[in-house]
Image (tube, rainbow, N blue to C red):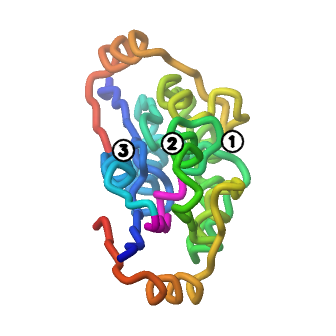
Amino acid sequence: MSKSLLIISRQAPWAGPSAREALDIALAGGAFDLPLGLLFLDDGVFQLLPEQQPSALQQKDLTANLQALPMFGVEALYVASRSLSERGLSEQPLALPVEQLDDSALSLLVDRYDQVITI
Amino acid sequence: MATLHLLSHSPFSDSRFASCLRLLGPQDGLLLSGDAVYALQPGTAQLQALQLMPDSIAVYALDEDLQARHLPVPERALAVDYPAFVELCATYAKVNSWL
């Protein structure tokens, strides 16, 4: 039985490679049927906003990669509700179906996985 | 001697934004680029802090960074392109980059 992995993605999407790299790990792990979870925390929640136009910065859109997650078997998708509310995004429709978790649920989530990586 | 302050880091993930607001002079300007434009996200304490500043402090934001993040331009701020960015740097007596 392979060990389960929780990926915590906490960087905004366009200022550096971190957001894309966290997503690449999730997609690669999903392709190998690893039991994976992906949590969007802190500025990582900005990855979930619809209608972003990274072409203005000569960057490739991450939306397609995000939407590929369920197809790669990565269906355990979570977002920290505190991170959303701090950024005025609580009522904002998001680009992916993600489960909102409060602080106490977050520690239980981390507890459930064998391994954790934060990017 | 007015200073143009350049911010490029997210106001949610570190303290540059808050520190900068504390030491702004009444004639200073603030230019947001990169993840710093998230300070204009509606419904946040960060945008409210900008709106509470005296009108004498100009707030600029780089247009392409706003577009990439699908952020609206609030009344308090003016969207600028790179040529206007350069012009602003020359207009103010000093430029302070919050690297």
Q: Tag 1, which secondary structure?
A: loop
Q: What residue do we see at 52% from left, 23% from top? A: A81
Task: Give the class, few, some or many, for how many residues have Cα within 10 Å of label 1's Cα (few <14, many ≥20).
Answer: some
Q: How many marks?
A: 3
Q: Are marks 1 and 3 on the same chain?
A: no
Quadrant, the N terminus of chain A: top left
Residue underneath mark 1: A95
Residue B29 in magenta? Answer: yes
Q: What label does residue A5 carry, if any? A: none
Look at label 2 and name its amino acid.
Ala
Q: Tag 2, which secondary structure?
A: helix
Q: Chain of mark 2?
A: B
Q: What residue do we see at 59% from left, 46% from top? A: B51
Q: What residue do we see at 34% from left, 48% from top? A: B22
Task: Give the class, few, some or many, for how many residues have Cα within 10 Å of label 3's Cα (few <14, many ≥20).
Answer: some
Query: Does B46 sit above or below residue A62?
Result: above
**Viewed as shown, does residue B19 lie left or right of B66?**
left
Spot occupied by residue A47 in the image (x, y as percentages of width and height): 55, 47
Can you tell which quarter of the image residue B64 is in? bottom right
Q: Chain of mark 3?
A: B
Tell whether label 2 touches label 3 (CB within 8 Å).
Answer: no
Q: Are marks 2 and 1 on the same chain?
A: no
Residue underneath mark 2: B49
CA–CA distance in space, label 2 to label 1: 28 Å
Look at label 1 and name its amino acid.
Ala
CA–CA distance in space, label 1 to label 3: 22 Å
Q: Are marks 3 and 2 on the same chain?
A: yes
Residue underneath mark 3: B13
Which span of residues is magenta-colored? B27-38
Query: Does A98 sit above or below residue A13?
Result: above
Q: Nearer the viewer, mark 1 or mark 3?
A: 3
